[in-house]
Amino acid sequence: MNTSKDENQDGSGWVYSQRVKEHFFNPKNLLQGDPNEYKSDGVGYVGSPACGDMMKMWIKVDHITDTVVECKWRTFGCASAIASTSILSEMVTENGGMSIDKAFKIKPQDIVERLAGLPDRKIHCSVLGDKALRAAINDYFRKSKQEGRIVKDKAKVICTCLNVTNHEIEDAVLEGKLTYEEVQKKTKCGTGCGSCKSRIEELIEQYKLQYYGE
């Protein structure tokens, strides 16, 4: 897998694509001014336990065409998080705006592809933007009385002895824990009766394929 070392504030020495650098140094659709004065249709807020990044996203929706016509954001995060969210905001608003349904289905791989790649240990940063976008879309559904379109992703307990969920295993993989032993050390899953080992291994492989393509 690729590795990266962040070097020099001007970007020289970074193992990042030119597109990542462009969106980091010149982020697009960053919300300026007082957020309380920005009139949005939906707001999403997420934080990443992997690196402490925090993000808030605002969207405006064309209620007739059901498309995202404006996407603003703010983040407290690293270069990869900023670049990922910047390019995501372009993806959902280009060509007159992306349909709500299509925007909701954007995956981290789509963002990474548009950025011409990210170091593997920074993949979790691309997840931050799409999670904030989905949260903003769900908020729009609530505010527009479309509760039937809200999509909820409920956590499932995988290790009943330690009460470890699939979300915690997913977060561990996003942090680069790619083996059963590494995930177990991070989450303590499987340290009780051990009957969940096969299911945990299946999830690790699923998330590795989903986020790293391997």
Image (spheres, grey):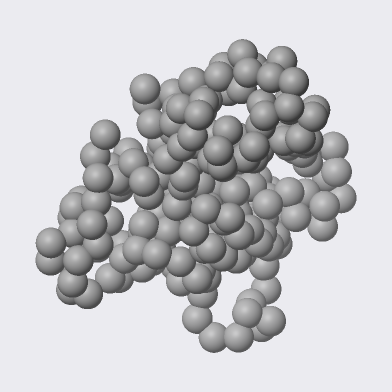
The residue positioned farthest toward the front in the image shown: 192
- Write the residue at 57% across / 56% down: 48
Quarter of the image where one finds residue 132? bottom right
Residue at the image position 40 percent from the left and 54 percent from the top: 84
Instruction: Provide residue 2's location: percent of width, then percent of height.
Output: 24, 39
Q: Which residue is drawn at 50% across and 29% down?
A: 181
Snapshot quadrant of residue 167: top right
Lateral position of residue 95 relative to residue 69, left or right: left
Q: Where is residue 159 in the image (x, y as percent from the top left)?
A: 73, 27
**Residue 201 point in image, percent of width and height:** 55, 19
Name, please, the residue furthest toward the left: 12
Taking the image as shown, residue 44 lies to the left or right of residue 16, namely: right
Q: Is residue 106 left or right of residue 168?
A: left
In this view of the protein, can residue 65 be seen by the observer? Answer: no
Give the x, y percent position of residue 85. 45, 57
Q: Quadrant of the N terminus?
A: top left
Looking at the rendered image, the quarter that the C terminus falls into is top left
* Residue 122, above or below 86: above
Number of callouts: 0
Q: Which of 158 and 89 is in front in this view?
A: 158
Depth check, front residue: 8 or 116: 8
Give the residue at x 60% y 86%.
Answer: 34
Give residue 198's quadrant in the image: top right
Of the pair 85 and 59, the residue shown nearer to us: 85
Determine whether 69 is above or below 166 in the image: below
Horizontally, residue 98 falls left or right of residue 5, namely right
Q: Is residue 64 above or below residue 153?
A: below
**Can the viewer see residue 208 in this picture?**
yes
